[in-house]
Image (tube, rainbow, N blue to C red):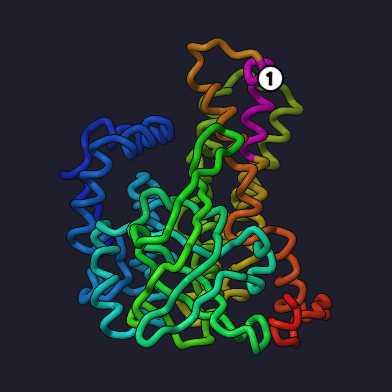
Amino acid sequence: MTALDAFRSILAEALPPEWIRAAAEQDTGELDRCAAGPDGDAVVRLIAADGWLTPEWPAAYGGRGLGPDDAVAVRGELRRLRIGNVTSAIGTAWVGPAILRFGTDAARDRLLPPIARNDDLWCQLFSEPEAGSDLAAVLTRARREGNDWILDGTKIWTSRADVARWGLALCRSDSSVTKHAGLTTFCVDMSAPGLTISPIRQLTGDCEFFEVTLQNVVVDDSLRLGDVGAGWDVVRAVLAFERSAGSGAGAAPPGSVVGRGLDEALAHFRGRLGPGQLDELVRVYVESRVVELNNLRGAVERSAGRGPIRGGVPYNKILQAEHTQRLQRLFVDLAGMEAVARTPQDAWTAYNVWAYLRVQAKTIAGGTSEILRNQVAERALGLPREADPSRDRPWREVTG
C-alpha cells in the first residue's frame, strides 16, 4: 500500500459523508463549507496527530518522513479535499521548512512539533510601510542587550496576525553594513508585551491582513533563526517556499485562494454559453493545464535538488497568480448582469463577486509579479541587474 493509499483510507473513515460527496462531485462551495466548520477543525487535528499535515518532515518533529513523490501526492490530496488552509500553511509549508533548515536543534525541538500538530499558527513579519517590494530596506531595529534582543518598528500586510501564536520577524541588526548584510530574523511571540496588532480592511470587507507594531519587544537569543546578519538568506528561503505553495507546488490541479476552478464554471454555466464565451473558457482551460503541468515539472526539479528558478519558482507563481485573476474574472463575465444586480438570496453570485475582489491581491502577495519578472530576467535569463544605488552602501548612509 502506498502512502497515498494509506492516507486515503484514514480519510475515508474520518470525513463525514457530505464531505466525501462534495469531493467526488467537485463541489468547491460545499467543500469550503465542510472545511470551515467544526468537522474541518476535527479532521485537521486528527491527521496532524499522525504527521500527515507535514508529510515530508522527519518523524522526530511531527511529520511522516515521506520522500518527495509520496509527500507531493499527500499534499495534493490535502488540497483536493480542502484540508488545512493558508492559516496553517504559513507554518507547515513556509516557516516550518525554514526552521528545519536554519534552526538549532533546540529551536526545532521547541517550535516544529506544535506546527505539525496545528497547535501553533504562524505569520510573517516581513513587509513594512516603506519596505515591500524592496524587502531588504526594512527599518525595524533589533539591538542586543546581553542574551536578549530588543525589537522596535512597524510591520504591515501581515496575514493572519490575529490568530498567530508566533511570527517570523525580519529586522535590521546592523546599519553599518549594506542593507542585505545587516539583517537578522527572529521568532516572535505574538502575545509579547509591546506588540500591538491592528486590522486592515480589504476590498471584500474582510480583515485578513494586519499592521503589527513592536515597541521594546524582548526576544531571547535562542529564538533567533539563522546567524546574526544572515536574515536575508532565511527570508529568501521562506519566500521561495511561499511562492512554491502559491504556484501550486505540483501537488494538485491549479485552483486559487478562493477554491473555485473551471470545473465549477462548466457545471454552473453549462448550456448557457455563446461561442465567444466558450472560446474564452477554452483559453483559460488551456492556461490552467499549463500551470498544472508546470507545477508537476517543478516538483520533479525540486525533488532532484535543483534550485527554485529551475524548479518553477518564481515564474510559475507569476503565471498562477495572474491565471487565478483571469479565472475569477471569467466567472463574473459569464454571470453577466447577475454579477452586477444580484438578488439578496443569490449566495452563489455573491460568492462570485467576493472571489473576484479577493484575488486582486494575488499578484502582490508572496512577491509582486513585477519584482518576480525582474528575478526571472536576471537569474534565469542572465539579463543585466536593475540599478540599485543603495545596494553597495552602508545602510546608515542610505537612511541618513
Residue at horizontal 22 percent and vertical 41 percent from the top: 15
Residue at horizontal 33 percent and vertical 67 percent from the top: 70
Residue range highlighted in magenta: 327-340
Quadrant of the snapshot with the N terminus: bottom left
Quadrant of the snapshot with the C terminus: bottom right
In x, y percent, where is residue 361?
62, 47
- For the residue pair 40 and 292, the one nearer the viewer reads as 40
Q: Residues within 10 Å of mark 1 (few under 14, many from 20)?
A: few
Give the dominant element type of the magenta stretch: helix, strand or loop.
Answer: helix
- For the residue pair 119 and 58, the one nearer the viewer reads as 119
Determine the secondary structure under disc 1: helix
- For the residue pair 340 and 209, the one nearer the viewer reads as 209
Residue 326 in sight in this render: yes
Q: Is residue 277 above or below residue 370?
A: above
Residue 144 occupies quadrant: bottom left
Residue 73 in sight in this render: no
208 lies left or right of 369: left
Per the image, the residue denoted by label 1 is 336
In x, y percent, where is residue 280?
72, 35
In x, y percent, where is residue 58?
26, 76
- Please name the amino acid that badge 1 sits on: Gly
Residue at horizontal 33 percent and vertical 70 percent from the top: 56
